[in-house]
Amino acid sequence: MLRVVVCVSGGGTNLQAIIDAVADGTITNTELVGVISNNYGVRALERAEKAGIDAKVVSPKDYENRAAFNEGLLTTIRAYKPDLIVLAGFLVVIPEAMIEEYENRIINIHPSLIPSFCGTGYYGLKVHEAALARGVKLTGATVHYVDKGTDTGPILLQKAVEVKPEDTPEILQRRVMEEAEWKLLPAAINMIANGEA
């Protein structure tokens, strides 16, 4: 069984897609052993609780500096003994020590077709605003391995989504989640769990 920890920052819609995919058998050979949020009181924590998954908050606000937070995050993750760490809307710079310790065992979902609209400063609605400003006809989502760069790790899966003339950043964000993110992330986890990645 692949032991998976999911890291979140907000609503947890990708977390819910993973929970549902494990429950319905879309993801096999996988156990969700923990959820870690860097924010208190977010919907993702409620989703974890409802699914019976252990959840913890590791907030930078609870530490005196970034180094202490990084160590706290790594200590919390280690306690779960994960085989895979999934960043599902985790808006935190991943500590270098964590990337080294879990090399090729951390994946991230990014709301664009990398290498477009990615890297430092591209997250959440900012990605979709940039896609609309550029006038692209296709966008989408990418699941990639996490390395020491920002959105630079090897790509595992991508799915394209049409950009429509009437789109706002919010409408486009929702379509990318529904048509790409919520399908790609479970598919990537299942591939890894079954030795296909």
Image (cartoon, rainbow, N blue to C red):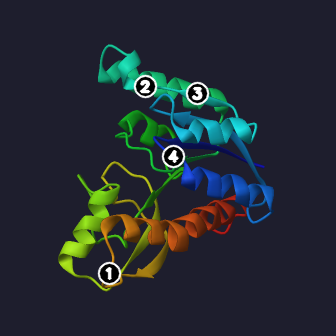
In which image quadrant can residue 190 be found? Answer: bottom right
Q: Amino acid at mark 2?
A: Ser
**Residue drawn at x 31%, y 86% as measured from the top left:** 137
Q: CA separation, marks 4 and 2?
A: 16 Å
Q: Which mark is residue 59?
A: 2
Q: CA separation, marks 2 and 1?
A: 38 Å
Which one is earlier in the sequence, the residue at label 1 or at label 4?
4
Q: Secondary structure at mark 4?
A: loop
Of circles 2 and 1, which is in front? 1
Q: Are marks 4 and 2 in contact (CB under 8 Å)?
A: no
Kindly tell me whether residue 73 is visible in this rendering. Answer: yes
Which one is earlier in the sequence, the residue at label 4 or at label 2?
4
Q: Amino acid at mark 3?
A: Lys
On the image, the x and y values in percent for residue 163 come to 36, 81
Per the image, the residue denoted by label 3 is 56
Of circles 4 and 2, which is in front? 4
> How many labels sit on residues?
4
Which residue is farthest front? 166
